[in-house]
């Protein structure tokens, strides 16, 4: 199903299942860092693949990105992006160490991948239960670099089947005081070939 | 002034214009330059070669037809077909994993396809800054044919 043909109801339904999935993921994150995690209303964007880096705040913005493929009954990619400062704040909460600037140690990388794994698993589990489908995340991959470079692998995968990308995005933030807020962006990018699975099942739920 | 060459785009211009491709990971930037006529182009490609059976999409997505398309465009705009030289940058593998998959070798395959396509078109490769596991931003100067490659954690760009 081409991305552009989605109706408002279908888009709303995608937002809603994403909201439910992200709710579970946020609960998991909140337990890990011992802080409240707030969610923004999800956004569904259909855009030219070339415009995706702009949506992420610019191709040269430094980001820590964790990407996973969605495996099982439906295919797609999950991207979890943290601005660099947020990634370090998250590590401070998780590992209890002091902010050590911009490099990531082996332990840091491993911890962040684990966060990615837990969030994606919680998200996909919730989605899978709702849709009665098996959805599992692949081993997480991490890159700490320019946003464009971090995400272009995912875009390459998508570009095999078209020139458009559909992103279901949920922004979240944690931490009480403003200077120490942890911000992250969670993206689901369904493969065009399996978008039908999401949409048909969601359509079924709605009537 | 927007001098950006975005993903899946190829663009040509004349000196003193400087073309820029930002945030390349596995993607590859291919710069073509005719020093005599000071005309050149830059492409920001995603995939090594176009599939034979499926619809094209944008030609600029693919290294092979992206390069040949850019050559034609340059010749039409007055470049010398035999005077062109090329420089390439990008083609990294951003994710270090213990297992090799099709996805994490795409950068290397993009670089290989660029070298092969250029060889087939008899365009000499004058410089390259490819591979590794870092993101790159490229600036291609169409007055001089110099390519500056910026990396996230290095202060100074690499000149090729």
Image: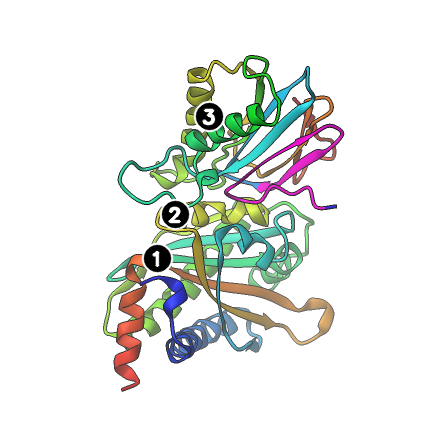
Identify the residue position indicated by label 1 in the image.
A191
Name the spot of residue A160 as percent of width and height, x first.
36, 46
Quarter of the image with the C terminus of chain A is bottom left
Are the residues tagged 3 and 2 within 8 Å (C-beta)? Answer: no
Q: Give residue A145's quadrant in the image.
A: top right
Image side of residue B140 versus residue A46, left or right = right
Name the spot of residue A99 as percent of width and height, x first.
68, 55
Neighbour tally class for label 1: few under 14, some 14-19, many 20 plus, Cα within 10 Å: many
Identify the residue position indicated by label 2 in the image.
A157
Q: CA distance from mark 1 to mark 2?
A: 9 Å
Dot 1: element: loop
Residue B114: which numbered mark, if any? 3
Q: Nearer the viewer, residue B141 or A137?
A: B141
Name the spot of residue B148 as percent of width and height, x first.
68, 29
Report if residue B149 is visible in the image: no
Q: Which residues are magenta?
A: B2-23
Callout in the foreground (3, 2): 3
Output the chain of dot 2.
Answer: A
Could you tell which of marks 1 and 2 lies nearer the N-terminus? 2
Report if residue B45 is visible in the image: yes
Q: Is residue A101 above or below residue A35?
A: above
Q: CA distance from mark 3 to mark 2?
A: 19 Å
């Amino acid at each position: 199903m081409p991305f552009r043909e989605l109706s408002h109801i279908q888009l709303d339904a995608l937002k809603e299942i994403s909201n439910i999935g992200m709710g579970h993921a946020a609960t998991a994150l909140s337990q890990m860092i011992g802080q409240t995690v707030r969610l923004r209303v999800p956004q569904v964007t259909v855009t030219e693949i070339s415009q995706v880096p702009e949506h992420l705040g610019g191709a040269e913005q430094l980001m820590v990105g964790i990407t996973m493929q969605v495996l099982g009954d439906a295919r797609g990619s999950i991207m979890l992006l943290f601005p660099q400062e947020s990634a370090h704040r998250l590590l401070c909460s998780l590992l209890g160490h002091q902010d050590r600037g911009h490099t990531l140690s082996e332990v840091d990388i491993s911890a962040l991948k684990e966060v990615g794994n837990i969030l994606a698993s919680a998200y996909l589990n919730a989605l899978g239960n709702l849709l009665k489908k098996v959805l599992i995340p692949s081993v997480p991959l991490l890159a700490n670099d320019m946003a464009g470079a971090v995400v272009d692998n995912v875009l390459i995968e998508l570009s095999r089947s078209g020139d458009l990308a559909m992103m279901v995005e949920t922004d979240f933030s944690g931490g009480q005081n403003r200077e120490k807020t942890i911000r992250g962006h969670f993206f689901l990018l369904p493969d065009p070939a399996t978008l039908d699975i999401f949409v048909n099942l969601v359509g079924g739920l709605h009537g | 002034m927007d001098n950006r060459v975005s993903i899946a785009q190829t663009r040509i211009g004349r000196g003193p214009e400087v073309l820029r491709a930002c945030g390349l990971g596995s993607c590859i930037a291919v710069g073509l330059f005719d020093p005599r006529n000071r005309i050149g182009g830059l492409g920001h490609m995603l995939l090594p070669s176009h599939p034979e059976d499926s619809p094209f999409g944008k030609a600029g997505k693919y290294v092979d037809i992206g390069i040949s398309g850019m050559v034609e465009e340059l010749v039409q705009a007055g470049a010398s077909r035999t005077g062109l030289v090329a420089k390439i940058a990008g083609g990294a593998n951003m994710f270090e994993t213990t297992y090799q998959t099709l996805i994490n070798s795409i950068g290397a395959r993009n670089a290989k396809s660029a070298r092969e396509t250029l060889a087939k078109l008899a365009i000499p490769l004058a410089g390259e800054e490819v591979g590794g596991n870092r993101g790159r931003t490229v600036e291609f100067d169409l007055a001089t044919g110099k390519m500056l490659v910026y990396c996230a954690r290095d202060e100074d760009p690499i000149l090729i």
